[in-house]
Amino acid sequence: MAASTADRIFLRGIELHAHHGLYEEEARLGQRFVIDVDWWLDAAPAAIHDDYEETVGYDKVFALVHEVSAGHRFQIIEALAEAIAGAVLARYPRVDKVRVEVHKPAAPIPGIFRDVGVEIIRTR
């Protein structure tokens, strides 16, 4: 079987209460963020051997998202997304590409909206 980095693992809807944003109220009160992460790697070795150690498990990425979010206050969600993507690539050399989507459904915008967010894609 040929190696493929078209294999994708994903996490949807990681919910965090965090203190990111431009305004002091956001830093003080915090708000809800929702994060989606996809990562591409060759999953064939893990699948063939049925071996968790040969993949990058979603539980590890889930914990990493929480670690990055709690470790620093970001002014903009682009920086939060970049930090998460960079951490995934740095910590897990098996990962060739990562997509991070950060949703900020309670962004301080004077009007009615359902969601705002940013999506970034980074590769090795």
Image: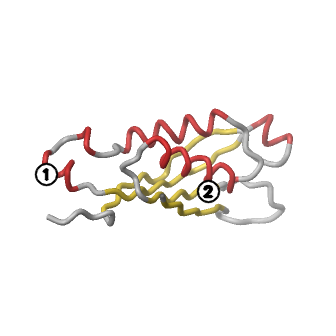
Return the residue at label 1: 48
Residue type pointed to by label 1: Ile
Residue type pointed to by label 2: His
Q: Nearer the viewer, residue 107 or 56?
A: 56
Looking at the image, is 94 positioned above or below residue 24? below
- N-terminal of the two: label 1 or label 2? 1
Q: Nearer the viewer, residue 32 or 47?
A: 47
Residue 100: x %, y % from top left: 53, 57
Total numbered labels: 2
Residue 103: x %, y % from top left: 61, 56
Residue 56: x %, y % from top left: 34, 45
Quarter of the N terminus within the rendering: bottom left
**Mark 1 and mark 2: Cα distance apart in space:** 35 Å
Return the residue at label 2: 103
Q: Nearer the viewer, residue 54 or 19?
A: 54
- Residue drawn at the location 65% of the way across and 61% of the way down: 117
* Labels 1 & 2 near each other (Cβ < 8 A): no
- Residue drawn at the location 63% of the way across and 62% of the way down: 118
- Residue drawn at the location 56% of the way across and 34% of the way down: 67
- Residue drawn at the location 56% of the way across and 49% of the way down: 86
Circle 1 SS class: helix
In-image side of 87 versus 93 (left or right): right
Looking at the image, is 40 positioned above or below residue 84? below
Residue 68: x %, y % from top left: 59, 38
Q: Which class describes the residues within 10 Å of circle 1: few (<14), some (14-19), or many (20+)? A: few
Circle 2 SS class: strand
